[in-house]
Image (cartoon, rainbow, N blue to C red):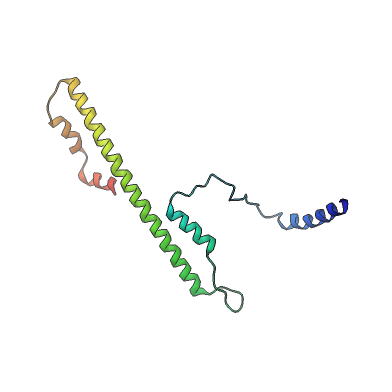
Amino acid sequence: MAERHKREAKLNRGRKAKNKGREVLPNTKKSTSTEVINQEHKEIIKWFQTVKFRRTLFGGVDENDVWKKLQELNQLYESAIRAERERYNILLTDHEKTYESQIYKYKQELMKNEGTTEQTEMDNTENEVPPETRNEVRR
């Protein structure tokens, strides 16, 4: 038992010296702080885990194969960006609807409290913001 411990200690000394300058990364499988957000991200992660490059005769990788793989990765990223934009636009329109309904509700309450019944007061605040600015926010 003591001999086995000595042998393992000798083997580990060499490993410690080799890894001395390197930073040891934690195991990513146990980390729960990084959650996959959507299906597109899952596809990108799967692609990174399964990608393999074709080797050339002298130990390098085939340049054409690398470009093909980069093109595949670019397509995956573009689809992820498109999906994020769609989600973002849906959230924006939903927020816009709730925001407009709340503004209308508060203006109605304000008109009741002040005793005014003029519709022009409600519409003036919407006309103060130029339409170009409103369109920029929606993009």
Residue 23: % across, % down: 65, 52
- Identify the residue at the far bottom of this view: 57
Q: Position of residue 4 (x, y in %)?
A: 84, 54
- Closest to the observer: 33 or 136? 33
**Left or right: 58 in relation to 81:** right
Badge count = 0
The answer to whether 22 is drawn above or below residue 60 in the figure is above
The quadrant where residue 113 appears: top left
- Horizontal relation, residue 23 to residue 34: left or right: right
Q: Quadrant of residue 119?
A: top left
Residue 97 in the image, given as x and y percentages of width and height = 26, 39
Residue shown at 21% from the left, 24% from the top: 110
Left or right, 109 with reference to 87: left
Judge whether 24 appears above or below 94 on screen.
below
Find residue 123 and report its image quarter.
Answer: top left
Residue at point 40%, 56% (across, down): 80
| Residue 117 percent location from the top left of the image | 12, 25
Q: Is residue 118 above or below residue 136?
A: above
